[in-house]
Amino acid sequence: MYSLYHAPLSPFCRKVRLVLAEKKIEVKLVEERYWEKDTDFLRRNPAGKVPILRANGKNMPESQAICEWLEAKHPEPALMPEDADAAYEVRRLCAWFDDAFFNQVTSNLLYERVNKKVQGAGYPDSSKVKAGAKAVKFHLDYMAWLLEKRRWLAGDVMTLADFAAASHLSALDYTSDVDWARHDVVKEWYAKIKSRPAFRGILSDVVPGFMPPPHYADLDF
């Protein structure tokens, strides 16, 4: 059995969890208080970040690398196209959400509203919260532009790009930071992906001191 060291609302951990669940891979989830920099944890990943997948006696960090390793080891169902151009588009969008979206939106909303309190790191920076609330609109508009031309974010089939995006949006939805009324096409896409059995695990997460809105785990919104 694999073990995954994770934090419940981390979009990077959620992406790996979705891949594991979609591929029906048995895994033991170990919640990690990574900000405490425990010695054993730093031995697993000196970078001090989650997720870390423990497999075959090895500790493997970095969500994208983990997901692509899982894809190679467990190719069914496929989440990465064989075509080079299509695979590039999936990787481009994964990078978009894990870099641009994370730095402009997730870190300014989720990390300011939730992580600071959980970690005892002070109060939210209102300027960062405002910046995140503004940036998320741009990213939702971009997603709508993509989905108006495609069935899924990277093309006509669901891929790792959809899990990367859904991981960030599901974490933000926990704190009601997504305006689902902005674009019907984005709301329909998210409703479709969060209704998958692979999503059940992350929709059951609860962070003490923070309760999700009623629609969070509602498959019909």
Image: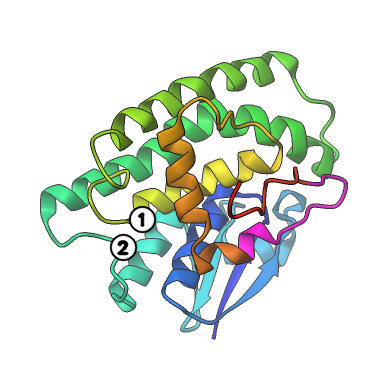
What is the quadrant of residue 215 in the picture? top right
**Could you say which is closer to the camera, residue 218 or residue 176?**
218
Q: Residue at x 41, y 74 (%)?
A: 23
Residue located farthest toward the front when viewing the structure as drawn: 220
Quadrant showing the N terminus: bottom right
Left or right: 112, with 190 as reference point: right
Q: Residue at x 45, y 20 (%)?
A: 138
Left or right: 27, with 65 as reference point: right
Q: Are marks 2 and 1 in contact (CB under 8 Å)?
A: yes
Q: Residue at x 60, y 16 (%)?
A: 131
Distance from disc 2 to disc 1, alpha carbons, whole Å, reads 5 Å
**Could you say which is closer to the camera, residue 182 or residue 160?**
182
* Label ID, residue 79: 2
Q: Residues within 10 Å of mark 1 (few under 14, many from 20)?
A: many
Residue 169, percent across and down? 54, 41
Q: Residue at x 52, y 55 (%)?
A: 194
Q: Amino acid at mark 2?
A: Leu
Look at the magenta stretch and give its main secondary structure.
Answer: loop
Residue 75, percent across and down? 28, 75
| Vertical side of 46 occupied by 138: above or below | above
Q: Amino acid at mark 1?
A: Leu
| Label located before the other in sequence (2 or 1) | 2
Residue 184, percent across and down? 45, 33
- Whether residue 98 is visible, yes or no, is no
Is residue 209 in the magenta section? yes
Judging by the rendered image, the residue that carries numbered circle 1 is 160
Instruction: Tally the marks.
Output: 2
